[in-house]
Structure formats: C-alpha cells, structure tokens
Image: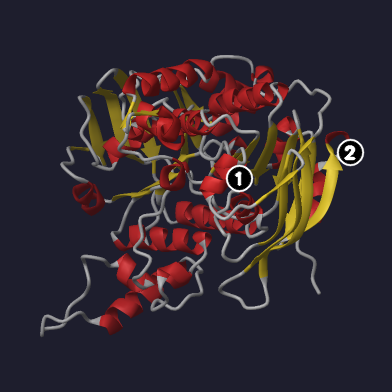
C-alpha cells in the first residue's frame, strides 16, 4: 500500500475546470483540492457536473479550460490509462470487471506478470493478488471467478485493482448503491484504513447520512458550478441540502394521501424457485393486493426477493413461477412481458441503464418503444404520432432534454429515470411497478419522482414501489410490506410503521 503521508498534503489540485457538451455547460470554472489521507465528498444533484469532473480527473476526456496539478506538477491525460499510471484510479457505480475471469486476472488484466518464456506467471499473479486481498480483508481465493462474488466483494476487487497501480488517489462513484448494510460498514472500515495509509479518496454520493462516518471535506456542485466547499464538520445536513438544491430541505418530501379505491391488483401464493439452489425459493408463497390510488411499498434487505417478485408479476419468470394474479378482478396469464403490458402492468426496472433504456437511442425512441404497435400505420411507424406521444410525456414529466432526439446516454441519471417512467406511462397502465425508482438519483430528482408518484396515485393508478431505502417508503407509501429471504414477513399501514418495526421484520432470524 501507500506510505503514510501528511493529511494536510494537497496531492491533487484542479483549477477553473470548464467543460461543455452540445447544448449543455457541464462545468463552469470549478476548483477542487484533494488531500492525502482525507476523503473529499463531491455532492450535487444529477446534472450538477460531478460525473463530468470525475471523468476529467480520470482522463476519460479533457477539460475545455482549466488546469490539473498532481503533486505540484501540471498534468494532462489523453486517456484513463495515463491517469492510472499517474496514480489516479476511478471505481464506477457500474463495476468494471470481467465476470468470467478470476479475481487475480481482473486485478492484473493487461499487466499480467510473465515468465522468461513469455507465458503468464500465474503463481506470481495469484501471490500478488492474495497479498492485496489480505490487506483489504477479503477472504477469497484469487482464483475465484468474479461472477461468483457478491457485489460488495466485487467492489473490494476494484479497490485492489486500484491499489495494484500504486494509486494515491481513488475516485469512488456511488459505491454503496447496491451494497447491503453489512457490506457498507465493511466498505467504510476499508475506506478509513486507506486514509490512514495516506490514500486520498474522492467520493460521490447522494446518501448524506454516510458522510459522518467517512467524510473529511466536501465540495458541492450545482448547475456546473462550485457553490460550497470546506471541512465536513463545518456544515449541517440542511446547509448541504440547501447548497445542492437551492431551496429549503423541508420542501423535498411530501405526499398527499387519499382514500384508496377498489382492489386493482391481487397476487396470491407467488412462488419463484431458485434455479441455483434446489429446494430454495427466491420468492416464497407471497400474497398481497393493491388498490386504485394506493402506493404499496415493499421493503427488504439485499436478497429479500423484492426485485424477483416484481419481475415475476411482469412475466419475466413464467417458466418457473407459480401462483395467481388478478387485475381488476380478472385472472390474467403472465407468460411474458407482452402479456403483462396487455393486462395493464408496467415495470420500471431496478437497473435503468441495463434493462430500462436503450442508451444509444433518443428520448423519443425510448419513450415510444413499448407503444409502437399502436403507432403503426400501413405497416410503418407514424413518426409524427411517435413524436407527439414523446412530447406529451416530456412535458407532463418535465423531462429536461435539449431535444427529443437527444440520446438518453447523454442525460443525467434523474432525467434518464423520468424517460423510463415516460416509456411505461405511455402504455396507459393500470398497475405501475417501480423497482428502486430513485437509485443513484440526487435529492431534487428524488423529490420530483416522489411528486410524480403522488400525482399518479391521485389519478387512480395502483403503484408498487420496491426500495431498499426505508425513508423513501415512509415518504411515499400508504402501506409497507416487508420481505426477508423471499418471504413476506410483515405488513404495516403507514400510520403504524416505524423504522424499528420494519427493520425487525426485514432481518433474517437465526434458526
């Protein structure tokens, strides 16, 4: 690992960093100081410029203006490899590992030690990988295939890979978004050990409650500009939120609760066997109902079966799932997503980039995808009707995009999530299933999504929100169903729900 360094030593300086993309001023004169042995949290809404700044520091693309100084010397990176070799590593929210390769092969990919014969020296590679894993307290064989690791373990492999470059600066982008509580605590312990070794960490997060455990300094961006910076201890949470969104935090979370109507969705005895563990179930005899105008929250820790339950209701596991589903009192067969859509069920999936959007396609193309059948005239897509449909939902959901033809790849996470919602609302669903609807989204975008959920519920939709964020469900749900290890373990009316009751029901019980 790194030698100890003075915590006050500035190892990275960015001055007057500016960057523009077509139609967007992503960064405007941003300054950043990063010190050895300290964690600098970079905060801001989606679209504030955080990812753009990190990509510039990591050599993904150059700034239009400004300078970067590394250990007192000006640097210009033509590509991420140059930044890596200079000691800057970045760990993206979507982990950048090859699932079919081993831990050791991922750590040293492209830099494998070789024998005199020119063949890879696997013994030495495994020894070096084992030493890194031991320092990071990951008790896994370096020969283990990465696909067999949990997400938290894969994250440690990414950190080991960064340290193998002798990185003095590690950038972490939303590192806890897919981790369990225990994995989060392990990561925080690891971060604090890295700081003690003199590693400088730049940490992007939307979870402000993480900061007291790890943050030393903060930098707040808004609309591409730096609007605040300093030691974390000098700022309250309310001050940080005000800097991020430009308004009082009390405006962020509110919901108008109304009397729900008739039962719209009834699911009974849903079972989904685990294909990898004979005799075990991902969803184990779960029954529930949702009424018109009601928001049902589903809470559970990682592995509880929330996602698998929603996917089953959307017809994604018809070959294995059993149980019955009724929509508006009528029994429906869900042999495919096509059947689910025809029955009035829509699913906004957990991973919007992998399963919710076609990133290279435009806003209008993504919005119209599930609705193309009714946009066809004489065998051809009616592009005028397609654009009118997209424009309707861009306006209704207040989607911020330079044009309908903008590729969704270039939109912020919060805006991408709105496009996912537009895509499914365009199908005129009766039941809307939302899986982690605000994952990786900033506070203001969360407020907007909550407002949309409220608006849709008041319009009579039956909505199911599956989330690992308990405050989110407490803000939007009328009832909260709790799952643990595939089973429904409790259900609470919002008035009766407390954090303690819900967490007690969500925790596995020892046999």
> Label 2's element?
helix
Please tell me in which quadrant of the rendered image residue 410 appears: top left
Please tell me in which quadrant of the rendered image residue 98 appears: bottom left
The correct choice, above or below, for 274 with respect to 384 in the image is below
Image quarter in which the N terminus is found:
bottom left
- Counting every numbered tag in the picture gives 2
Q: Which residue, as the protein is rendered here, is positioned at the far left?
A: 117
Q: Residues within 10 Å of mark 2 (few under 14, many from 20)?
A: few
Circle 2 or circle 1, nearest the eye: 2
From the image, tell me which residue sits under label 1.
Answer: 213
Q: Position of residue 18 (x, y in %)?
A: 27, 23
From the image, tell me which residue sits under label 2.
Answer: 496
Q: Residue at x 54, y 51 (%)?
A: 178
**Camera-nearest residue between 258 and 372:** 372
Q: Residue at x 53, y 17 (%)?
A: 396
Q: Residue at x 63, y 52 (%)?
A: 333
Q: Which residue, as the protein is rendered here, is positioned at the far front?
A: 378
> Label 1's element?
helix
**Camera-nearest residue between 399 and 259:** 259
Q: Is residue 307 visible?
A: yes
Q: Is residue 6 visible?
A: no
Q: Residue at x 32, y 66 (%)?
A: 107
Q: Residues within 10 Å of mark 1 (few under 14, many from 20)?
A: few
Q: Position of residue 100 (x, y in %)?
A: 35, 70
**Camera-nearest residue between 470 and 34:** 470
Disc 2 vs disc 1: Cβ atoms closer than 8 Å? Answer: no
Report how far apart the C-alphas of labels 2 and 1 lie in the structure: 30 Å
Left/right of residue 507 with respect to residue 315 in the rendered view: right
Image quarter in which the C terminus is found:
bottom right
Q: Position of residue 474 (x, y in %)?
A: 75, 35
Left/right of residue 73 with respect to residue 503 in the rendered view: left
């Amino acid at each position: 690992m790194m030698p100890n360094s003075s915590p006050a030593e500035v190892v990275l300086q960015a001055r007057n960093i500016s960057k523009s993309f077509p139609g967007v001023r992503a960064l405007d004169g941003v300054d950043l100081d990063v010190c050895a042995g300290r964690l600098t949290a970079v905060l801001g809404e989606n679209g504030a410029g955080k990812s753009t700044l990190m990509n510039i520091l990591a050599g993904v693309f150059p700034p239009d203006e400004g300078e970067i100084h590394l250990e007192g010397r000006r640097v210009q990176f033509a590509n991420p490899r140059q930044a890596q070799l200079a000691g800057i590593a970045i760990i993206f929210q979507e982990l950048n590992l090859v699932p079919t390769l081993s831990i050791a092969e991922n750590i040293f990919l492209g830099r494998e030690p070789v024998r005199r014969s020119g063949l890879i020296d696997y013994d030495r590679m495994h020894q070096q990988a084992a030493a890194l894993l031991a320092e990071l307290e990951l008790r896994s064989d370096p020969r283990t295939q990465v696909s067999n690791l949990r997400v938290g373990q894969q994250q440690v492999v990414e950190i080991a890979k960064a340290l193998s470059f002798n990185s003095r600066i590690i950038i972490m982008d939303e590192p806890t978004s897919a981790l369990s509580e225990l994995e989060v605590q392990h990561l925080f312990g690891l971060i604090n050990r890295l700081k003690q070794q003199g590693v400088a960490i730049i940490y992007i997060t939307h979870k402000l409650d993480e900061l007291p455990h790890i943050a030393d300094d903060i930098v707040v961006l808004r609309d591409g500009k730096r609007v605040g910076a300093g030691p974390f201890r000098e700022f309250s949470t309310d001050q940080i939120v005000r800097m991020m969104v430009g308004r009082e935090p009390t405006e962020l979370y509110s919901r108008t609760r109304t009397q729900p109507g008739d039962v719209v969705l009834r699911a009974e005895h849903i079972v989904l066997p685990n294909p990898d563990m004979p005799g075990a179930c991902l969803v184990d005899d779960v029954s529930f109902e949702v009424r018109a105008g009601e928001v049902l929250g589903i809470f559970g820790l990682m592995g509880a079966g929330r996602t698998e339950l929603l996917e089953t209701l959307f017809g994604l596991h018809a070959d294995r799932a059993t149980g019955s589903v009724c929509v508006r009192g009528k029994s429906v067969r869900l042999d495919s997503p096509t059947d689910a859509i025809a029955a009035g069920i829509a699913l906004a999936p957990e991973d919007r980039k992998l399963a919710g959007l076609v990133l290279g396609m435009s806003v209008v193309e993504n919005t119209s995808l599930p609705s193309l059948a009714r946009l066809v005239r004489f065998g051809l897509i009616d592009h005028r009707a397609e654009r009118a449909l997209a424009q309707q939902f861009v306006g209704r959901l207040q989607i911020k995009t330079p044009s309908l033809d903008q590729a969704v790849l270039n939109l912020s996470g919060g805006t991408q999530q709105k496009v996912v919602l537009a895509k499914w609302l365009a199908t005129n669903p009766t039941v809307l299933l939302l899986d982690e609807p605000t994952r990786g989204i900033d506070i203001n975008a969360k407020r907007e999504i909550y407002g949309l959920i409220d608006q849709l519920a008041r319009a009579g939709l039956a909505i199911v929100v599956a989330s690992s964020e308990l405050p989110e469900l407490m803000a939007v749900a009328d009832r909260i169903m709790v799952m643990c290890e595939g089973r429904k373990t409790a259900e609470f009316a919002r008035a009766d729900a407390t954090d303690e009751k819900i967490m007690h029901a969500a925790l596995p019980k020892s046999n």
